[in-house]
Image: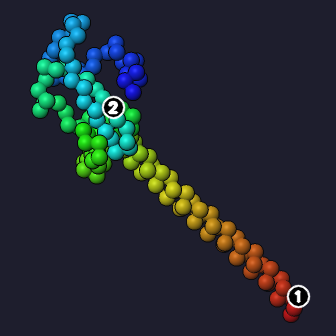
Amino acid sequence: MNSSNSAIRGSRVGAGPSGEKDTGFQAERIQRTYYCFNNHSFSPLFAASAEVEELPTELDCPHCGLPAGLDKDNPPQIAKHEPYKTHLAYVKERRTEAEAKALLDEAVAAVRERRERLLAEAKAEIKKNTKANKRSA
Ligand SMILES: [Zn+2]
């Protein structure tokens, strides 16, 4: 799957807190593979000068944005990251709010409409019954 990484060759891989200078000198790299809950895997390269302990144990999956960990059989669960909200989550939340308000407005309008229709129907019914009563009388 490394061939798919060629598109990002021009940008710095493993840009991080190591403060390594981008001199074009190809330093040794550590490649680690991360796995997300959706069975995606990706293998970013880290500067070999970094201590293994310094390397992140979790990264956001570039495919789906979920946290990805090093244990293939036990990827990070989304539930563990409850306080973390993606921008999309916020957008969805806002939209739901707006949708709820729209639905409420719609419901109120529908009730009002139905009430008026029922009232009109009742009036028509009364009129009809009055006529019928007159006819039968
Ligand atoms: Zn993923």
Measure the C-alpha gap from mark 2 to mark 1.
85 Å
Q: Residues within 10 Å of mark 1 (few under 14, many from 20)?
A: few
At horizontal 55% and vertical 57% (from top left) the residue drawn is 106
Total labels: the figure holds 2
Of residues 112 and 2, the one drawn nearer to the viewer in this rendering: 2
At horizontal 63% and vertical 67% (from top left) the residue drawn is 114
Q: Quadrant of the N terminus?
A: top left
In the rendering, at what x and y percent does residue 67 appear? Answer: 29, 40
Which residue was labeled with disc 1? 135
At horizontal 72% and vertical 73% (from top left) the residue drawn is 121
Report which quarter residue 62 is drawn in.
Answer: top left
Sequence order check, earlier mark of 2 and 1 = 2
Q: Which mark is residue 74?
A: none
Residue 25 position (above or below residue 35): above
Residue 134 position (above or below residue 114): below
Q: Secondary structure at mark 1?
A: helix
Left or right of 7? Residue 116 is right
Q: Quadrant of the C terminus?
A: bottom right
In the rendering, at what x and y percent does residue 11 appear? Answer: 32, 15
In the rendering, at what x and y percent does residue 86 appear? Answer: 33, 40
Q: Residue furthest right?
A: 135
Of residues 117 and 29, the one drawn nearer to the viewer in this rendering: 29
Q: Residues within 10 Å of mark 2 (few under 14, many from 20)?
A: some
Q: Amino acid at mark 2?
A: Phe
Which residue was labeled with disc 2? 42
Of residues 93 and 135, the one drawn nearer to the viewer in this rendering: 93
At horizontal 75% and vertical 78% (from top left) the residue drawn is 125
Left or right of 72? Residue 129 is right
Residue 13 position (above or below residue 112): above
Q: From this viewpoint, is residue 67 visible?
A: no
